[in-house]
Image (cartoon, helix red, strand yellow):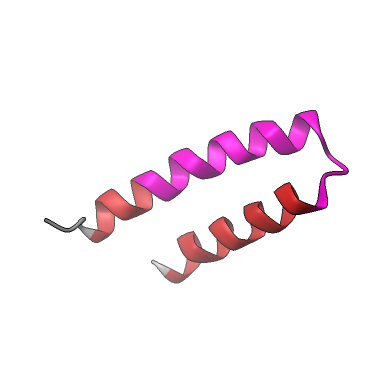
Amino acid sequence: MGMTNKQFQGFIRLALELIDKAVNKSPDNEELQKLKDIFQLMLEEGN
């Protein structure tokens, strides 16, 4: 059973919110920032 596009975007938004919180706690963590950028791109490409 696969996910619909809407479900996938919801998952990405949820993960992005958690990543944002982590970036705020550790703003100089480059790996977190790269992960945030990847998830943001995934969300933008899904629209």
Q: Quadrant of residue 13?
A: top left
Quadrant placement of the C terminus: bottom left
User: Which span of residues is magenta-colored?
Assistant: 11-30
Residue drawn at x 71%, y 58% as measured from the top left: 34
Instruction: Please tell me how many numbered marks the rendered image carries.
Output: 0
Residue drawn at x 60%, y 62% as measured from the top left: 38
Q: Quadrant of residue 39?
A: bottom right
Percent across and percent down for residue 27 are 84, 39
Percent across and percent down for residue 40 are 57, 58
Q: Nearer the viewer, residue 22 or 6?
A: 22
Quadrant placement of the N terminus: bottom left
Q: Main secondary structure of the magenta part?
A: helix
Left or right of 14, for residue 1: left
Q: Is residue 20 above or below residue 34?
A: above
Left or right of 24, for residue 11: left
Percent across and percent down for residue 41 are 56, 65
